[in-house]
Image (cartoon, grey):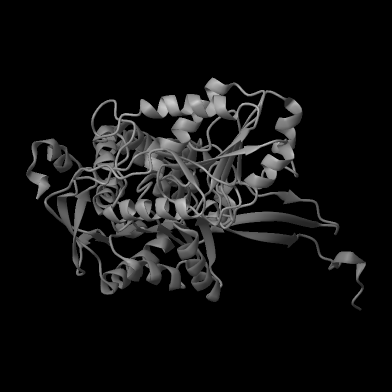
């Protein structure tokens, strides 16, 4: 077991051991499900064992969580914000260790791993301020001696199902806001990143314990599809936040809708960068490199399609090929590495299958396109010339594969951008105000994230994150995303002695 290796000594500092119980239920670590092994994708060696949860563990956890919800929702929102502030401070003390764990278990490079944990800290800071601004409107009434206002109240319990590519940041987007809004959180982490789920939970649990709060305010499970399905079906969970593929997200939505629950979906992306003929090409090339190669192409906001104006096509492509040659591939924990491994050996096989499909549909491999022989799940960063109409371009291949294509006019580029089922992120590189405002306007990009002169990835937490169409329509993190985590009531109060009716109705 790799846990005994010297470079893994830091894991004990965040509460992990060679064998870990994977469920935090009402203040107790327990698990009665199968034993799984967490694997380092850089060498496919075992890190540690985790005992997953069973449905019995889930039911016990939900009973405790339901009781805790009655208490937590009555705590004043600014006091709830204080607890989230303390969670942020606890994260700061373990930022390096948790970031290193993200890099080790998921496979993203160390700066990205640390950045992911920092994103949760930022969400904590954002949510502390939000806890004093959960405001409702006061609305003028047409009736004399009447007042009308909005009240925002907690939903009760929020279920959060996260994916491997951001194994803790997406939990932060949801949990920080859900907690200040007065909800308990039930978290099912990704099956292949159980150590991150456990380490994060230990940190949150420590803050709750220090403040003598019910531990079931935060409940977590390591487990497979059975736990996820239980969350989706559970009528005690009014809101389910799911991050994953469009295919699985649709199934989750159907299950939740059958019980009239609410879904917050963050699903597949198929993101394009458009480079106009007046663009700052050096800036565009740097941005494309980060957007296409970062996280080994495993972000939902990864740039998968590069649309180049025909007059600068070869110039941009040549510069891009030059920077691709400089990409250091290797151990994500080593300084200077830019491209780590794919997360699993199955991902590596999917890359290989994807390249064969690309070739069969007329794609021309410009660079890359092959597996890298090693113990880990490494592949070459790949650039492909292909028609925007090829079927494979409409799908999300979760790997560092970039499709390059030409266009002649802005309108053509916008149509290509909008031609895929997904609608998460998009960006255009130009210096023309007229082009910029068309791009962000009603006849521009149909995505939830519409950027100018920056990559498709690397979103800030202050804005609402999410997309349209097959990306699911959910919004997390900043702006007014908090409203999805609360129940709105419109309240009309008659403080007089008469009973005037709306719309001037006289009912005797």
110 or 52, which is in the foreground?
110
Can you give x and y, in whole percent of width and height, for residue 176 in the image?
43, 46
Q: In this view, does 34 lie above or below 413?
A: below
Q: In this view, does 119 lie above or below 282?
A: below
Pick out the residue farthest to the bottom: 508
- Image quarter where the C terminus lies is bottom right
Instruction: Locate residue 386 relative to residue 1 in the image: left or right.
Output: right
Can you give x and y, in whole percent of width and height, for residue 383 in the image?
45, 38
468 or 57, which is in the foreground?
468
Instruction: Locate residue 101 relative to residue 326 in the image: left or right.
Output: left
491 or 295, which is in the foreground?
295
Residue 452 visible (yes or no): yes
Can you give x and y, in whole percent of width and height, for residue 404 in the image?
54, 39
Which quadrant holds residue 146? bottom right
The residue under the point 9% across, 36% down is: 6
Instruction: Locate residue 170 relative to residue 269 in the image: left or right.
Output: left
């Amino acid at each position: 077991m790799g846990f005994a290796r010297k470079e893994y000594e830091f894991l004990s500092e965040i509460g992990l051991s060679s064998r870990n119980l994977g469920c935090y239920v009402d203040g107790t670590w327990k698990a009665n499900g199968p034993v799984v092994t967490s694997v380092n994708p850089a060498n496919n060696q075992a890190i540690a064992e985790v005992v997953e949860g069973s449905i019995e563990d889930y039911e016990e956890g939900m009973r405790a969580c339901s009781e805790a919800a009655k208490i937590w929702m009555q705590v004043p929102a600014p006091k709830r914000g204080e607890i989230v502030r303390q969670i942020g401070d606890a994260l700061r003390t373990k930022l390096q260790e948790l970031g290193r764990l993200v890099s080790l278990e998921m496979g993203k490079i160390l700066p990205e791993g640390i950045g992911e944990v920092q994103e949760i800290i930022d969400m904590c800071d954002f949510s502390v301020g939000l806890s004093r601004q959960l405001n409702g409107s006061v609305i003028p009434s047409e009736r004399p001696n009447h007042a009308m206002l909005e009240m925002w109240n907690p939903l009760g319990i929020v279920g959060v199902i996260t994916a491997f590519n951001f194994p803790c940041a997406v939990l932060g987007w949801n949990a920080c806001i859900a907690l200040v809004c007065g909800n308990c959180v039930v978290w099912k982490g990704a099956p292949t990143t159980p150590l991150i789920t456990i380490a994060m939970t230990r940190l949150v649990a420590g803050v709750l314990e220090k403040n003598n709060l019910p531990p079931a305010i935060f409940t977590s499970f390591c487990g497979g599809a059975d736990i996820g399905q239980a969350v989706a079906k559970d009528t005690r969970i009014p809101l389910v936040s799911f991050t994953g593929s469009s295919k699985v997200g649709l199934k989750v939505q159907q299950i939740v809708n059958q019980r009239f629950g609410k879904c917050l979906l963050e699903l597949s992306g198929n993101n394009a960068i458009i480079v106009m003929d007046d663009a700052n090409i050096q800036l565009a090339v740097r941005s494309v490199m980060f957007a296409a190669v970062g996280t080994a192409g495993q972000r939902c906001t990864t740039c998968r399609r590069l649309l180049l104006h025909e007059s600068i096509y070869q110039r941009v492509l040549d510069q891009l090929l030059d920077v691709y040659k400089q990409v250091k591939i290797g151990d994500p924990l080593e300084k200077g590495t830019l491209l780590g491994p794919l997360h699993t050996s199955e991902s590596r096989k999917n890359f290989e299958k994807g390249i064969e499909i690309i070739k069969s549909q007329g794609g021309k491999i410009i660079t890359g396109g092959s597996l890298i022989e090693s113990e880990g799940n490494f592949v070459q960063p790949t650039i492909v010339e292909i028609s925007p109409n090829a079927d494979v371009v409409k799908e999300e291949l979760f790997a560092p594969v970039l499709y390059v294509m030409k266009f002649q006019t802005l309108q053509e580029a916008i149509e290509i951008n909008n031609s895929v089922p997904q609608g998460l992120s998009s960006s255009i590189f130009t210096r023309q105000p007229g082009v910029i405002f068309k791009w962000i306007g009603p006849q521009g990009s149909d995505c939830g994230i519409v950027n100018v002169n920056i990559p498709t990835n690397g979103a800030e937490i202050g804005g609402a994150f999410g997309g349209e169409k097959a990306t699911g329509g959910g919004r997390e993190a900043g702006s007014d995303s908090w409203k999805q985590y609360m129940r709105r009531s419109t309240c009309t109060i008659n403080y007089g002695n008469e009973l005037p009716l709306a719309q001037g109705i006289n009912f005797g």
